[in-house]
Every structure is written in structure tokens, then in C-alpha cells.
Image (cartoon, rainbow, N blue to C red):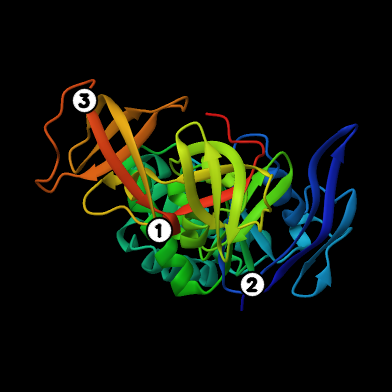
Amino acid sequence: MSQDVELDHVTMNFGAFTAVKDVSLTIKAGEFFSFLGPSGCGKTTILRMISGFNDPTEGTIRIGGQDMRGIGPNARPTALIFQNLALFPLMTVWENIAFGLEARYVPRAKRRKRAEELLELIALTDAADKRVSQLSGGQRQRVAIARALAVEPKVMLLDEPLSALDLKLRQHMRAELRAIQRRTGVTFIYITHDQGEALTMSDRVAVMSQGVIQQVANAAEIYNDPATPFVATFVGENNIFRGTVVSVAGELAEIDTPSGRLRGRNRAGLSVGSAALLFARPERITPRSGAVTAEINSLDLQLNHIDFEGNFANLFLTGAGERTIIMQMANNGSLPRLQSGETVPVSFAAADAVILPDGPLATS
């Protein structure tokens, strides 16, 4: 059975440096939960505290309702998979998988039986007696997962385990990991800086910056309804319009920008006079057609260039006093034939834009 993991006002200081600041959240039993953020944001420090390699400076970590302070890694109901996998090259695959059971003095026959069950789970039944060196990168990844599962952890901790794989194999292993998690029902806590991994695999994602949780939500909400400017710019591409709120009506607000007045969802409940940022995803900006209404934002921009990427194209446009604005269009036969410098009338719905307080953005 999996178990809840609760972080209750957890802070981790290293001397004068605060790596994690006042984090409170509950990861539900059986959930695939990811911490997403740039290098140095504190996500690996959280994993090390959950696994028992560090005790928090302040706050409490509970697994299955039990306070973990003072309980070492070997005594916790967790298993940790490192980036480098740490498989033993002189052992066979089944011996690698059963290593944790051997350390618990489980008899050899039972170890072999459990290893074979896990090899079936990870679809490597014919690899039991092979050496690790005979396996591909993806196969070694699955063996590391099986070895962690052998000791029947309640919580599986994964520290950027796919970072060393090439793109196609990473994409394949995302599906493999998610399928294994669903079959076992174990709580997975996954650390990554790759938004594609986090959004594809996770039930929920915590986006972190400088030791602080910016937002916790499912993938669609993180992408479509970011809570802070950092989340809006770290997860996916976003066009940014900077301005001041000039009116508020229901769930929408209007801001005055160098490109004119634009409307969007007033997610943070800003009032008139507030400094604000409006975010619009490139795929939500479209060539303008039909009448412009109060629910539609309209802009006349100039084409800089087009990047063709196969199934879609990015049109790089410039407007009055703004950074480059990107419009993404599907390659479905409707791509316009344009020359650099041409005027491109575009629009996007107010409901597709998010207005947030002016604040720190993610750095590229």
C-alpha cells in the first residue's frame, strides 16, 4: 500500500542560505507528484529531506502520518532512484533487482522469485541472467525501478532519472514510468526541470522557484491558468504585455499597454491602477477574421520571420514597444504566405489571456 507524504511548514537552511522556504503540501497516497523548477530551486533538497538524507531546519515531514524526524533513510518506507542509477556492473540483472532483499537476509530462492516477478512487470523477463552492460539505457532505467520496487516501498523518489537519456528514449520512458506507477499504485515523487516530463506524467505538479512553491495543480491548470508570472513564463511559451489596470468587470480586467488596451482573466483580483502583466499563449493568438468585439483583443503587427517546424510554424511578430510576439499555427493548409515586414492582423480572446500582478519572470 502507498502512503501520504505531508510537508508541514518545511524550511531547509544551509548556513545563511535558505534552500527551501516554508513549504506546506500533502502528496496523496498513490499519486504521481512532480516537483518542477530550474536548477537550484530547492526541489532536490525536498527529495533529500523526504528520503532522510537531511532533516529540515524547521517544520515536519510525515509519511503515512508518522513524523520522520530522526529516522534514517534505511528505516523509512521510501526508495530513491538517482540520476546515475547506481546499478552494479558485476551482478546479473536479477541480482541487481534483488540486492535490497539480500541486505534484508531474504533467502536466495525467494529473492530470485521476486526478481522474476518484477522483471515481468517491467517487460524484461528474458534479461534475468544478463549483465547490466548488455542492456540499453532504457532497459537499465527499468531495472533501477524494479530494484527500488523489490523492497516494497510505500513512496518512490525519483531524482531526474531520465536526464541522461536521448529525447526519443526519454519520451518512451515517460510512458513506461507512468504505466509502472499505475500498475503498482506506489506513491511516486518525481524531480525534474523538464516541463514536458512533469506535465505528461503527473497527477499534480508543484512549480518551484528559489525555494518557494509557486503553484500546485494538475498539468492543465498549471499551463492554462498560471498563478504567478514565474509559472506563466517557466511552463511553456507565453507572450507578455506589460501595463496598468484601467478597468475591472466581473472576472475580466483591462490593462493599458504600449500596444493598446487589452483584456484578460483577472486571476489575482487586481484593482484599477495596479501594475500588471497580461499573458497570451502563442497557440491562442490567431489571424484576425470577422468583427472585433469587447471579448476579443485585436492587434496589427509586423512579420519578422517564420520558423517552420513541420507540424506547426511559429510566426515572429513585432508591435508597438513590445518584445517579439509569437503566433503559433498548425500546418493544416492554412499557413499564410507572407513576406517579412508585412502587416499581420491578429486577435485573441480575453478568456484565453491571464492578467497577473507584475512580478519576477523565469529566466531563459
Q: Horizontal placement of 41 versus 266: left or right?
A: right
Q: Position of residue 71 (x, y in %)?
A: 84, 60
What distance separates the C-alpha of mark 3 from that of mark 2? 53 Å
**Label placed on residue 295:** 1
Q: Quarter of the image containing the N terminus?
A: bottom right
What distance separates the C-alpha of mark 1 from that of mark 3? 26 Å
Q: Position of residue 51 (x, y in %)?
A: 72, 55
Relative height, residue 272 to residue 38 (above, below): below
Q: Position of residue 287 (x, y in %)?
A: 24, 44
User: Is 24 in front, or is 274?
Assistant: 274
At a point 43% along the width and 71% down the height, the residue shown is 117
Which residue ends up furthest to the bottom in the rendered image?
A: 1
Q: Name the mark nearer the viewer: 3 or 2.
A: 3
Badge 1 or badge 2: first in the primary sequence: 2
Query: What residue is pinned by disc 3?
Result: 342
- The crowd level at tag 3 (other Cα within 10 Å; few <14, some 14-19, many 20+) is few
- Which kind of residue does numbered mark 1 sit on? Glu
Q: Position of residue 353 (x, y in %)?
A: 46, 52
Relative height, residue 284 to residue 316 (above, below): below
User: Is 76 in front, or is 110?
Assistant: 76
Query: What residue is pinned by disc 2?
Result: 28
Badge 3 or badge 2: first in the primary sequence: 2
